[in-house]
Image (cartoon, grey):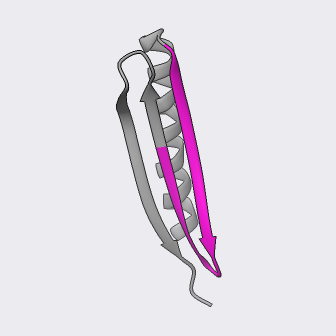
Amino acid sequence: MKGESYFKTLSFQVQYIIDWFLVAKKPIVLIFLRLRRGLSYVDAWLLLDISFGKTIYSHCRFYEWNR
């Protein structure tokens, strides 16, 4: 099912981000965006390390629900 695979992917991403928070011990910012238009939407994750000004992890995924 679509919903089950989405939640498995989401739980993996959240675990990955939590691991970074625990290991890095640096100033880190998590940005999550959801852009929606009708039945379609895009999720975007961005994990930034402020001290070095670089992206640690980024993810973008497009979803379209059929009527």
Residue span colored magenta: 27-45
The residue drawn where x is 39% and y is 43% is 58
The residue drawn where x is 53% and y is 37% is 14
- The C terminus: image quadrant: bottom right
Q: Can residue 43 be found in the magenta stretch?
A: yes
The residue drawn where x is 37% and y is 25% is 53
- The outermost residue toward the bottom is 67
Q: Can residue 41 be found in the magenta stretch?
A: yes
Tell me the chief SS of the magenta region: strand
Q: Position of residue 52 (x, y in %)?
A: 35, 18
Q: Say whether residue 1 is visible.
A: no
Query: Vertical placement of 52 versus 59: above or below?
Result: above
Query: Vertical placement of 4 versus 53: above or below?
Result: below
In this rendering, the count of numbered labels is: 0
Query: Vertical placement of 62 versus 31: above or below?
Result: below
Query: Vertical placement of 2 versus 67: above or below?
Result: above
